[in-house]
Structure formats: C-alpha cells, structure tokens
Amino acid sequence: MELLNVDKYWELIGSKLSRWLETGVQHIPNLIVALVFIIFFSFFVRIAGKVIRNVLRRTFDSRQIADLLSAIIKSCLIMLGIFICLDFIGLKGTVTSLLAGAGIIGLAIGFAFQDMTENLIAGIVMGIRKPFKMGDVIEANGVFGSVQTINLRNTLVETFSGQIEVIPNKILFRNILTNFTILGIRKVEVPVSISYADDPDEAANVIVSALNKCDFVIRKNETAVFAESFGDSAINLLVWFWIDYPGEPGYMAARHGAISSIKQSLETADILIPFPIRTLDFGAKGGKELSTVLTEQFQTKNQKSES
C-alpha cells in the first residue's frame, strides 16, 4: 500500500487558494461599488418607503391595506437592490437561482394558504376599487348593516340589531353587494288595500297628496301609487316615495310616518281599508241567492213535517 503523497495535496490546496485570492482581489472594485450602492440604496428605500406609505394611507380607507402594500413595495425594492449587488459581484447564477426559488416558494405558499390568500387579495382589490367605505350601509350575503372596520382578511359590519358580523373579503368580492349609502337616497314601498267599493284613482290622489306634505319625502314629483292586484277582499295598492338615506328621520321612522299619514288621509276621505271579509254569493253566474236557498229549504222542511 502506497503512502499518501502529502506534498501533492498541499500543492493542490495552495493552487486553489491562490486562484481564489486572485479572483477575490480582482473583485475588490466590484465589492466596493456594491457596498457603496447598498449604503445609498438603503437610504433611498427608507425614504421611498415612508413616501409610499403616506400616499397609500391617504388613498385607502384601511390603514392595514396601506401598510401591507407599502411593505410589499419596500420588500420588492430591497430584493431589487440585492440582485443588482449580486450582479455587480458577478454572481448572475445566484440571482437566477434565487428568483427560481422565490417563485417555487411563493407557489407553495399560495396553495397552502389558498383561503387566506384569496381573502387578502380580495381585500386589496376592494381597497383599490372602493365599493364601500367605513360607515356605509351595505347588504351582502344576508348581512345588512353599517361597515365598521375594513381589514386585510375580513370586514366587520354592525347590523341594525346591534350584532357584529365578520364577513370574509372573498364573500364581498364574489357575491352581489348592495350599497345603500353611495347614492344617498332610498325608495320606500308601502302596500295598502282599499275596498272594492272605493275608486283606486281617488285613493291614489289622496295618498300622494298626504305623503307629499311629509318633510321626510323627497322627489315629491315621483311619489306614486299603483294598483297592484285584486285581493280576496280588497284592491291592493303599492305606494312609492323617496327619502334621504342614510339620514333623518331614518328608514323605519319614515315608513312609520308614511303609514300613519296614509291611514289618516284615507279615513278623512271616507275610503275604507278593509279587514278580511268573506261573502257567500249563490247568485253569481246563474246560481241561486242565499235567501232563495234558505227559503226553499224552509219550505221543503215544512212539507215533510205536514206529510
């Protein structure tokens, strides 16, 4: 068995070290440039981050969304600076490997936290599009109330029964959302019934005149009453009028005031709001009247008793 040639290995190690040292000396200017670039770029990123955060906070209603977007932009700027420095040093292959690794990691995280990512992206998109803001009255997915907080993953809505509903942002983004505040007005519909003995046109004029005297009614030229259908014991009317919303006196108070005004005006005009009535009429379409039927039954009963 031959002994190891130590001198040969030492010579190989020395040649490797000398080449590394030579390469390092050659890259000293690049290292200096990269170091200077990092110093200046760090100051640039710090100033740019503050400016971007302030701009986004003025743009978005949610402070969390603004801070998240500013952090993402700042991180992208930092990664850009690192890649530029690596390119100065001559490590282009390292840059490519880092980009590929970042893409794979991002894909894995996206699949692992798909629900969280979807809510996050939906929150960012809604922050940009602004379908609603804090304080707006909205209705979505069966929840009706006032928006209290807009977070990255969910939105908090206070219902009119005093409950806080936490709605994931993807639900608001996917489904139909009604914003009752954005236009500042709302139409109120009130069903009314009158008897068949009264004239629907006369009732409509009486109701419109009474409603237009109410202070909460706006667009008075659009206040209207329509005959909707024939009921079992009444003609069904549908009353429309507009109010400021949100505003005073509020939807329920305005509806209450409208119903009271309609009732009083119809009573004053001697127009009946009937309760359910059932009439037995045996004389329709060739049938017998009830009095005739009772008389015939009475006569038949007397004939049987005499015989």
Image (tube, rainbow, N blue to C red):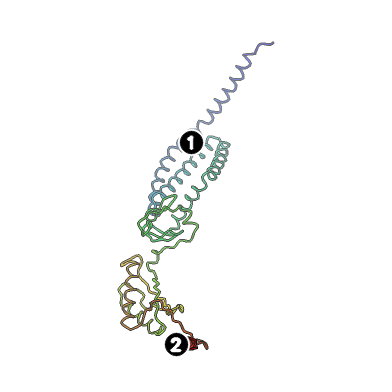
Residue 155 falls left or right of residue 83: left
Q: Residues within 10 Å of mark 1 (few under 14, many from 20)?
A: some
- Comes first in the chain, label 1 or label 2: 1
Q: Find numbered disc 1 in the image and state the secondary structure of the residue it sits on.
A: helix
User: In the image as oriented, which residue stretches furthest toward the front?
Assistant: 307
Kindly identify the amino acid type of the residue bearing the numbered disc 2. Answer: Ser
Question: Does residue 257 lie above or below 81 as drawn?
Answer: below
Distance (Cα) linking label 1 and label 2: 111 Å
Name the one closer to the observer, 30 or 238: 238
Kindly identify the amino acid type of the residue bearing the numbered disc 1. Answer: Ala
Q: Residue at x 53, y 28 (%)?
A: 24
In terms of image quadrants, where is residue 221? bottom left
Residue 153 falls left or right of residue 1: left
Q: Which residue is drawn at 49% across and 41% down?
A: 79
Residues at discs 1 and 2 in contact (Cβ within 8 Å): no
Which x, y percent locates residue 224?
40, 78
Question: Does residue 119 lie above or below 89 as drawn?
Answer: below
Which x, y percent locates residue 235?
43, 80
Pointer 2 residue: 291
Name the one closer to the observer, 219 or 22: 219
Of marks 1 and 2, the one in the foreground: 2
Residue 223 falls left or right of residue 103: left
Pointer 1 residue: 34
Which corner quadrant holds the N terminus? top right
Mark linked to residue 99: none
Q: Find numbered disc 2 in the image and state the secondary structure of the residue it sits on.
A: helix
Question: Does residue 241 lie above or below 7 as drawn?
Answer: below
Which x, y percent locates residue 163?
37, 55
Residue 226 appears in the picture as rendered = no
Q: Residue at x 31, y 67 (%)?
A: 249
In terms of image quadrants, where is residue 6? top right
